[in-house]
Image (spheres, coloured by chain):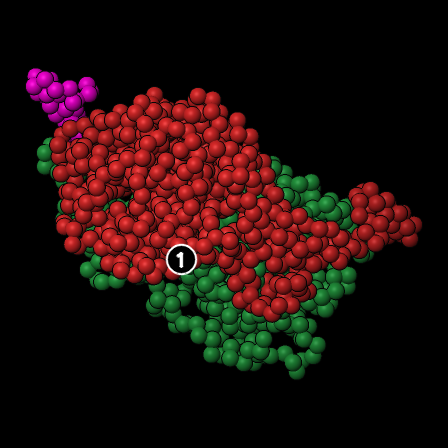
Chain colours: A green, B red
Amino acid sequence: MANSSVNEMNISIMSNFSGSKKVYIEGSRPDLKVPMREIELSPTTGTFGNEENPPVRVYDTSGPYTDPDYSVDIRKGLPALRRKWILERDDVEEYEGREVKPEDNGYKNRNKQTSREHYQSLKREPLRAKEGKNVTQLHYARKGIITPEMEFIAIRENVSAEFVRDEVASGRAIIPANINHPESEPMIIGRNFHVKINANIGNSAVTSSIEEEVEKMTWATRWGADTMMDLSTGKDIHTTREWIIRNSPVPVGTVPIYQALEKVNGVAEDLTWEVYRDTLIEQAEQGVDYFTIHAGVLLRYVPLTAKRVTGIVSRGGSIMAQWCLYHHKESFLYTHFEEICEIMKKYDIAFSLGDGLRPGSIADANDEAQFAELETLGELTKIAWKHDVQVMIEGPGHVPMHLIKENVDKQMEICQEAPFYTLGPLTTDIAPGYDHITSAIGAAMIGWYGTAMLCYVTPKEHLGLPNKDDVREGVITYKIAAHAADLAKGHPGAKNRDDALSKARFEFRWRDQFNLSLDPEKALEYHDETLPAEGAKTAHFCSMCGPKFCSMRISQDIREYAKEKGLDTQSAIETGLKEKAKEFKEAGGTLYKEV
Amino acid sequence: MANSSVNEMNISIMSNFSGSKKVYIEGSRPDLKVPMREIELSPTTGTFGNEENPPVRVYDTSGPYTDPDYSVDIRKGLPALRRKWILERDDVEEYEGREVKPEDNGYKNRNKQTSREHYQSLKREPLRAKEGKNVTQLHYARKGIITPEMEFIAIRENVSAEFVRDEVASGRAIIPANINHPESEPMIIGRNFHVKINANIGNSAVTSSIEEEVEKMTWATRWGADTMMDLSTGKDIHTTREWIIRNSPVPVGTVPIYQALEKVNGVAEDLTWEVYRDTLIEQAEQGVDYFTIHAGVLLRYVPLTAKRVTGIVSRGGSIMAQWCLYHHKESFLYTHFEEICEIMKKYDIAFSLGDGLRPGSIADANDEAQFAELETLGELTKIAWKHDVQVMIEGPGHVPMHLIKENVDKQMEICQEAPFYTLGPLTTDIAPGYDHITSAIGAAMIGWYGTAMLCYVTPKEHLGLPNKDDVREGVITYKIAAHAADLAKGHPGAKNRDDALSKARFEFRWRDQFNLSLDPEKALEYHDETLPAEGAKTAHFCSMCGPKFCSMRISQDIREYAKEKGLDTQSAIETGLKEKAKEFKEAGGTLYKEV
């Protein structure tokens, strides 16, 4: 796990996708520029017609890494684009943060701690709310204030800034943006915006390193992850997280109980509110934007999981259940919930109220344990909102298709439309190795029904820690699910990309087709497996059918022929048919059915 | 495309999946033995309890290739397991079939034709119905007869033979089983049975060879394809098909218009009813079990596609549309439909009424052209049923989620519940390279709504011809969609496999988990990427979380602890809580919330 090579981390400018370039849309002030990816298209020519095809702009999560004018230095971190906006509000103060201890990284003493010198280059003094102030976007929204973050988002989502403010004020949407993560490009999670996806990264005791995790982060955002969760459970948790946050253009979430558990050497019973509180502060100062907190795993719910096929499958949920049972006490996350709110509101950290009792198998879907916890999450949502702390609600899990809608209906009602953030759900248990697919089915559906963010699942689910290829596969799969949901919801503008790609496909503008796709590199690679020659990029066929049988080519031939013969409308055909039928009848034949 | 090496085709016994063996369930007669795959499981031991886990039986499409007692010789073909049943019915006669011509394989003269000597070893005299006889399973079912095919299916599907007969008689299900394909293991396609999947194979002018196509067939059936379509469009169409059918344990479908088009040198306008009819007979004698026939692409519908984004995406549909428009005549498939029925009923070939006007993009979904054709397919269904010819209806295509159900509702009504057989549908256009996933979402949903068979889509869709890896990926993906649909429909017994796998997962019986999965080899491979040592196969963690954080392990610890302390029921917890609360209160604390 040592990482003296963190200096040599090979993260530099990533070329943008072929045919694409980064553009910025300016807002009401020069320091508010919203990045988009603009895809250039070739003109329509020849028999297909004669017209320019306007470039297509798509949402871009990749951050400055795909900006050729930006010079990457991960030891410095990304530009603090939001810092001015935060300081302007004049409700925060800089202070000397908590001292970083060896235990934060899972070491017993200072000597063993690695990368201190690298860490120093990243570190800066944290901010927190001034005495008596509340710095959450929800707080501002409820005061009727449109922040620069809200304006940024309005441009990104192509809606009005007032609409953004209203959705946040009502609790239907959240803007995860810790004042100590000024590098993040503001984004929103809510049912009335584009469906978002989250990618999980993080090491485990068994494998991975800091470099790999930072690389996974830039890799995942390149492919389209809207947020990132760092779920590390091994060594160097603190340092890994610092590197990630300082360099992450998207919000970062964590599950603080993991690090707290490391601090008590993995013995759940030894957890205390004090250790947990200290961990919250530590992570708040680093800039974590949302915390998964399993405050709904109550002592009295634990026996409800006794008869389950797969018990408790949430790491955090199982840890808290163990603690509750051992101490025979109510969860300290629950009993100290308001104190947690007091911390969250000083930094603007959003709750991701954890589904510790989510079903981990089809057999356990929608059971008593799951919905009991949901009731408590509803109760906690109200308390958080009392403090103007932003909230989203986590959801399942493993749920067969016919039980999916019930999850959304119940969550909407019980949690008063707070955004829903589900893991899949997987629609069957029988395909480890393909759980990105078993869950894409459920995720697309639950997104259609109203879920705001989908947590990705990779092919490695249930089997091991994902590597970079798995991360890519998981991200693209979940972009598919999210976009399919946007289409089904009739989200304005969603269909434009499908239409542009299909038009390119029909006109054999192969490069345009690839460049418009979610994974231009793979589309090109697969096409070129059988037809690599440059000429094939304008060929009116591919190796699926060959030149004679390509239906798209034949389709086009038909259109040209029809036009030529004046047969391109239904009335023309009917007239023609009537004439032919008359001819035939007069000649004694009966071939033509009466139209 | 030459294949002098067809002798050396490397198809031998395929080892069964790990932990699995072939078993046969005998029916009412010794020559009726239904193959199943039986997965052996380890016992539950240790803290999890002490019990045997009964073996799990699953549906098996792999044929004799996974029977260790069977000696494969593809030059001889599979055993003609149905031949006796067919002859017993005393309604067929052997006859000297049509002469195979060089044109059948796309050659101009006899010298160029390859593999004649190999072909000879496979060839046998075809059967057809005696004069005045109708040999379809639908005909028998309507006469109240339960055929051995129906009994075989009843055992395979775990239902009564009478139920099978009734579903077939009503037209709600079909048994594709040409009397000239006696090697096939009978199967049924219908909404009240397991959802089925089809895999497409076949060469194109650009790539592939006979060996590769035969290998794809045994490969696809190994992974679970219920039927196969040979969609070859290149050279050696006839020979390729013969090799495939003689060696295929599953029904084989084709699109006869492809070969007909080859015979007229790819010039659609030169197609004639006579060439087509000859092709039908040729393929009927070989043993094709179902024909995709685009008899619903009528001349007057063609202009309805003029404004579409992707025109006509069906090969057969575009060919017929071109023919209609050129000749300004109604499609000969439509005008000669009853003559086609007369041929089908002599061999028991089922119609797969083609969706030539299916939408090939989100923009074109559920449009006028698509549903106009569906109306005609409804009309043709009635005609086919008049002849007791079996019918299934093909469906889309590209359809966003919110428009999927309408397709099933309309098809059920218009086509009187004939089985629906869809291609996906793809729920978005924007992910070439991942269209197995974009379509798995739609396929699972449309299967849940009542579609009987799902035609697979591979990662190569829109980009090129699939290779073996793509075939595997496509088959497994579609097994997932079909099974997710079975679960959502509450299909009896479907959930058993999910429960057995999840139980194995919870108990860390890793090998059992892999062996129960759809792709045991991949599950094992992914797990072993990070934890290859043999000891890891009984470890209570994997590299996702490591030993400390595995929620399943913690879950189990919780259960043991709870049991130990007598805290494994909710009432026990509540009692304990009340006592603790009382203690605390007396000590002055207020930690415990009143239960």
Residue A163, given in percent of the width and then of the height, sits at 46, 42
Instruction: Tell me if residue A119 can be seen.
Output: yes
Instruction: Identify the image quadrant of the N terminus of chain A.
Output: bottom right
Residue A275 lies left or right of residue A69; in this view the side is right
Residue B60 drawn at (x, y percent): 50, 46
Q: Residue at x 13, y 38 (%)?
A: B270
Q: Is residue B344 left or right of residue A248?
A: left
Q: What residue is at 69 percent from the left and 40 percent from the top?
A: A368
Q: Residue at x 31, y 51 (%)?
A: B121
Can the viewer see residue A59 in this picture?
Answer: no
A82 vs B393: above or below:
below
Q: Quadrant of residue A160?
A: top left
Chain under disc 1: B
Q: Is residue B62 left or right of residue B426?
A: right
Residue A586 among magenta residues: yes
In the image, residue A178 sits, relative to residue A582, either above or below, namely: below
Instruction: Indicate the position of residue B418 as horizontal and vertical percent values.
Output: 40, 28
Work out whether residue A140 or residue A309 is closer to the camera in this orientation and state it: A309
The amino acid on which the numbered mark 1 sits, given as a three-letter code, is Ile
Q: Is residue A16 above or below residue A517?
A: below
Question: Magenta stretch?
Answer: A567-595
Residue located 45% across and 63% down the image = A469
Q: Name the foreground residue: B403 vs B477.
A: B477
